[in-house]
Amino acid sequence: MTHKQPTLDLSPKVSDEIRKTTCYMCACRCGINVHMKKDPLGDLKVAYIEGNRDHPVNQGVLCAKGSAGIMQHNAPSRLKSPMKRVGERGSGEFEEISWDEAYEIAASWLKPIRETNPEKLAFFTGRDQSQSFTSLWAQSFGTPNYAAHGGFCSVNMAAAGIYTMGGAFWEFGQPDWDHTKLFMLFGVAEDHDSNPIKMGIGKIKKRGARVIGVNPIRTGYNAVADDWVGITPGTDGLFILSMIHCLMKAGRMDLNYLAQYTDAAVLINGDDKSPEFGLKLRDENGKELVIDRTTGKLTPYDQKGVKPDLSATHRAKGITHRPVFHQMAEMYLDDQYAPETVAETCGISAERIRTIAAELARVAFDEAFELDHEWTDFRGETHKTMTGRPVSFHAMRGISAHANGFQTCRALHVLQIILGTVEVPGGFRFKPPYPKPATAHPKPHVGICPDQPLDGPHLGFVHGPEDLALKDDGTPARIDKAFTWENPMSVHGLMHMVISNAYAGDPYKIDTLFMYMANMSWNSSMNTTGVIEMLTDKDESGEYVIPRIIYSDAYSSEMVAYSDLILPDTTYLERHDCISLLDRPICEADAAADAIRWPVVEPDRNVKGFQSALCDLGAKLGLPAFVNDDGSQKYTDYADYIVNHERRPGVGPLAGWRMGENGLQNGRGGVNASQMENYIGNGGFFVEHIPDGANYYKPWNQAYQDWAVKMGIFDSQQPYLFTLYSEPMRKFQLAAEGHGERQPPEHLRERVKETMSPLPIWYETDQEGNEGFTVTALTQRPMAMYHSWGSQNAWLRQLHGRNPMYIPSKLMKAHALTDGDWAEITSPHGKITVPVMEMAALNDNTIWTWNAIGKRKGAWALDEEAPEATKGFLLNHLIHELMPPKGDGLRWANSDPITGQAAWFDLKVAIKKVDAPSDAVSLPSMKSIKSPVGKGPAELKWKVGQ
């Protein structure tokens, strides 16, 4: 009898439809396929999410966060309707209202402000990805008080990179994964750029490349590194400068690269009696001058055939001008940067510092290679090949979030540059629209006039004291004190100082605080308890010190309870978004790219995408950018804006499928009414590859510059030199030395002189008030979470439902601690009582925990006994936005003195073993707040499909 084989369907239908959009579970912006199934009523519901293999960012790879997006979309904590507060702030007592009433309330608060004094509105956004749009709204309103979250995240990295070389890490650039042989990471946790880095590390390790991780904590990328350097927190800059010392002393530098593509040969005024001492020598057109090695003559750096001389000096009018390279040699060959001098401070042996520096040089120079790509530089010289130096770097918040972080980040960029590894094969490569030098960016604007737009963009790059955001009387023009003598180069603003300054009335009082996606009453603030008090405190008349707070979020976060008017946002699967070349794009080093989100499902609640709400509110207020000439609403919603807005002629939020004379084209072009449909049909993204021969040496490559103009990145070619020597910083020093009309206040004069060195330096952060607190305490986000959103996700909670304090073996023994014991961790500002766990792969004098796991009872629709609310905790309770008082009556921000970057990682603590609290709940434990959405079910489940 013949056996009959069963008929098997080897490719069963797994969904009824696939809708492709962009993930928002972190800032990677990966492409996703959202599988939809019909429910019993025939409506399509989200069934599961996978990576889009065609997408340029992730090529189908999707992490745990991305897959868990279905739980984010269905989270019980989602807000359901606009709400107005009816109880006291912090009570969670709200009344649901209509959108019309919400707009009426908002307009009744905002319209009088705009008509009388627009600075009384402070509008700040969190980790949104629509800053070109929200800044336009704020600019049209007329307030100078706008910024996003960069000031408390990684502004040091971004600002240092742009001021030095026209871009930085993260969305500005990436390693040349195809050619690099040595990859070195500094201060990188796993929440930023996670899929591309994981894919890249996998690619380079497969072919035998070496990875060096520099981080006090060995997790994630550092755990798979071939070498881990458990550095003392805050000393990365000293370590880097010591390696520069070793390289310069050994003569292991790319001298041709330095001469041709950087300001190393640019001449500097050497007369210490001159009011221009330390400034660059320029011609009548403002171009930097060098000595041509061939002719021996003084000439602008960009002339055809010029070979800049790194050693020649020039004397004119009794003043000797020396090249930047001379200044570098004098500074970095000094024994203060010798490995033996810095080893103890950095926690790295002198031998190891020398070994790593030598390995960087060996790979960069001894394993150099050539690519047969002909290219022409900005001086008109044609090169037959491109020289590859296969060493690349990546760094993020770990070196940025210190009060010396700006100079540390600059030092890292200088290290890359002297090795000749930036924008060459095998090295670090920029992603369009970068490289873009600081001079190509706007300057900050604060010119206000009642009932009128601001006189220009809020944020930008200052180039001297004349660009500071000061009023006529010298006081700060912005509520966060950005672009003042306290932090002159604060290109992302200081969001972490807004509530504190508004509460103190320093520099002035505000009327309305308007925020989006910024959980400032919990994990996004330093000094959590203090901020809560500021939000709830009342004056003598019984009115709140900060009179009105408008907030938009998709979820019932802690900040919701402290707001007066709630504008409920959608989940990322229910909204339109634009990941734009005007903002934070998804480009690769070889291509320009942008993307959209679109509503793969419609909301089942009375919610609206925040950007669409701003279109409505902008029209109601009559903001010029949001109304037509007849006063009617210009954009019906954010999708309408994305398609029809033009930032300048032919350049809009999206670069793909624009209308040209002969049909659709990319880059520049007119409005295409079907553009959104074109993106959806292409999987939600657009890519335009850089032509062969134009994809390296971008700042100096004529072919790239021409392509960038065609794409609308520039309006004309913008070649420039990398800036080893920051002239804007020298101008601030000159002012502090007594030159110029704008002078710093006396209490800041010495600080400006000491910290704003035009060549990168390292300095110890302010330790005043830290006596007896000798251990550094850090936080970082886990790979499975990005925003505080993640720890209310039903799947991700199972990975990180609680967080211990990780303590190195040495300190565990010193305090007689074992796993599961409890410790009281104190700082000059506060204390927490938490469970501890031993970790061997940790700097000997550093403790750390995961960020944003702890939750306030009653928030996020979690049960009051949820582990996040009982066993989870925040380190934020130990951190303050201000330094301990110095007895001078001044408020000193706990920030980088150059950029205002929040110095999260300068926290010093003491450890004491204690008994566990009787209820085994981490301390402090705050009283529960009422949830406006109720409490989620014990089990989160639903049926998808028939």
Image (tube, rainbow, N blue to C red):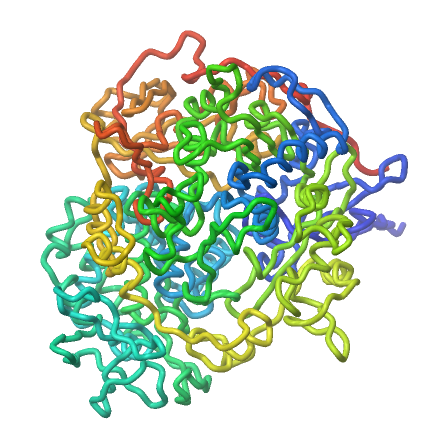
Query: In this rendering, does residue 323 appear at all?
Result: yes
The quadrant the C terminus occupies is: top right
- Seen at 35% across and 47% down, the residue is 484
Q: Residue 206, position in %: x, y?
A: 45, 62
Between 774 and 36, the one nearer to me in the picture: 774
Height in image: 710 above or below 733?
A: below
Q: Residue 895, position in %: x, y?
A: 33, 40
- Seen at 54% across and 18% down, the residue is 857
Q: Is residue 760 left or right of residue 36?
A: left
Q: Residue 423, position in %: x, y?
A: 41, 71
Q: Quadrant of residue 38?
A: top right
Query: In this rendering, does residue 223 appear at all?
Result: no
Q: Quadrant of residue 169?
A: bottom left
Height in image: 332 above or below 930?
A: below
Q: Residue 779, position in %: x, y?
A: 39, 35
Height in image: 641 above or below 690?
A: above
Q: Quadrant of residue 903?
A: top left
Q: Is residue 232 left or right of residue 518?
A: left
Q: Is residue 146 left or right of residue 553?
A: left
